[in-house]
Image: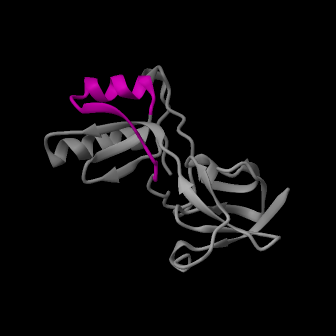
Amino acid sequence: MRQVNRVIPAEYMDGQETKDTVTLNRQDRYRRRFRLTSDRGDDVLLNFPEPTYLEPGSGLSASDGNVYLVRAAPEDLLQIFANTSLMQVHLAWHLGNRHTPAEITAEGIFIRYDHVLEKLMQDLGAGVRRVQRPFEPVGGAYGGKGALHESHHHHNTANHAHHTH
């Protein structure tokens, strides 16, 4: 099994010869130690001293000198949009209040598919569409681009404990 312990940043990958690609979802692109299979079937072990973010377009440098190009896998997401900027901010606040990782673009807010949040957004007047695309949520204020905190929304929102950070 090939072992990877170094990432080549995407901006240094131009002209870099690659052996293969690895296509990973967002969660699997933030790891410390992880066994994966390349797109052509190579067994690869990521082995970093600390959790490391694997940006799409970056390279994984293996101990045998081979380089694997990182690709972002399409994921099952909700695209959330509103008719006004104020409504979009209102929707973003509700998602943030539930600590939901979100990608914010000109086309809307993208979150991992969740039927409860889908209904909440619809009840709040949002347009909601289920889509398949790579997911790049905004990094947390404390964790940077690579940090991805799983949501812990509550299905019974009446019991949601509000707290200060």
Please provide percent x and percent y for residue 96. Answer: 41, 44
Question: Could you tell me which quadrant the N terminus lies in?
Answer: bottom right
Q: Residue furthest right?
A: 1
The residue positioned 50% from the left and 26% from the top of the image is: 154
Q: Is residue 31 above or below residue 62?
A: above
Q: What are the residue bounds of the magenta stretch? A: 113-136
The residue positioned 68% from the left and 65% from the top of the image is: 19
- Report if residue 4 lies within the magenta region: no
Please provide percent x and percent y for residue 117. Answer: 40, 28
In the displayed structure, does residue 137 sit left or right of residue 70?
left
- Report if residue 116 lies within the magenta region: yes
The residue positioned 26% from the left and 23% from the top of the image is: 123
Please provide percent x and percent y for residue 24. Answer: 59, 49
Q: Quadrant of residue 143?
A: bottom right
Please provide percent x and percent y for residue 17. Answer: 62, 74
> Is residue 154 or residue 103 the one in the foreground?
103
Q: Quadrant of residue 20?
A: bottom right
Q: Quadrant of residue 62?
A: bottom right
> Is residue 121 or residue 66 the one in the foreground?
66
Q: Is residue 118 above or below residue 164?
A: above
> Is residue 105 or residue 131 the one in the foreground?
131
